[in-house]
Amino acid sequence: MRKQIAAANWKMNLTYQQAEKLIDDLLALPHQLNDNQQAIFAVPFPYLQMVANRLAGKQNVFVAAQNCSNKKSGAYTGETSLEILQSIGVNHVVIGHSERREYFNENNQLLAEKVDICLSNNATPIFCCGEPLSVREANEQDAFVAKQLQESLYHLSAEDIQKVVIAYEPIWAIGTGKTATSQQAQDIQAFIRKQIATQYNDAVANNISILYGGSVKASNAKEIFSQADVDGGLVGGASLIAEEFNTIINSLK
């Protein structure tokens, strides 16, 4: 059975003290993750060790970095390598969020390198893909997303691509309050799975978790997650409210 995942992306929010309170409040709330469910917290770099310590010993709960370098080590001031992340117990990394693509000019080739460095170090990349509003309005989202997958993931072996978590995020729905309908989410996530099946095979495609991101909140999570090809969500604003994100965790199927 595919992993069902509620992934929190705190982005560039919260002071250290606020982050401590949020993770403590959330962990105090009632939730139970079964063997095929995970909660992942992608937090700002200075908080990774603190959150990793809070999650130590807990089942199916992980901390993630919001980015990593495509370089192993060296004179890259301001960058953070996989080796550094893993030395503090971080083995999940968000790769290619639309904000990284837009504001920091990360392209598909660079993201392929970041995926590779994650996999070569036995870390789990959460690979983000998705289209802007102009592409959606032109009804070209399928081709746009297919190109992202092809240029960043399809060089991987059948074994390795199954170690990647894919997060589809329509850029027009991130932080805007607009949300793709549950059917829109299902349609493109089924398209993504079909593309992977064509490139590899059905067994490979059916073993990959595909998350939906874009204004997921407590009130719509259960409906969105109920769709056959939606395996959870990558959650922004709602993950900053303990009760909201706890409800989202409890909405996993």
Image (cartoon, helix red, strand yellow):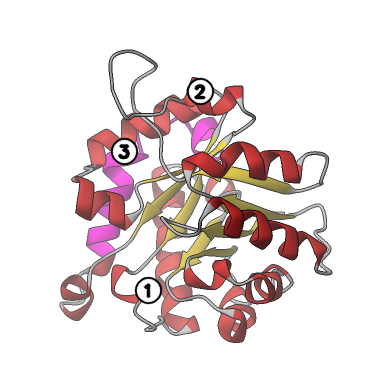
According to the image, label 2 marks what residue?
84
Separation of disc 2 and disc 3 at Cα? 19 Å
- In the rendered image, residue 171, in percent from the top left (x then y), is placed at 30, 68
Magenta segment, which residues? 142-163
Name the residue: 29% across, 44% down: 150
- Say which quadrant the C terminus sits in: bottom right
Q: How many marks?
A: 3
According to the image, label 1 marks what residue?
175
Asked whether 168 or 22 is in front, the reply is 22
Q: Is residue 126 above or below residue 211?
A: above
Few, some or many residues within 10 Å of mark 3 (<14, 14–19, 20+) = many
- Say which quadrant the N terminus sits in: bottom right
Separation of disc 1 and disc 2 at Cα? 30 Å
* Pointer 1 or 2: first along the chain: 2
- In the rendered image, residue 215, in percent from the top left (x then y), is placed at 45, 76
* Pointer 1 or 3: first along the chain: 3
> Which amino acid type corresponds to the residue marked 1 in the rendered image?
Gly
Name the residue: 41% across, 41% down: 67
> Contact (CB < 8 A) between labels 2 and 3?
no
According to the image, label 3 marks what residue?
111
Residue 229: in sight, yes or no? no
- In the rendered image, residue 183, in percent from the top left (x then y), is placed at 47, 83
* Pointer 2 or 3: first along the chain: 2
Instruction: Indicate yes or no whether the magenta region holds residue 147.
Output: yes
Separation of disc 1 and disc 3 at Cα? 23 Å
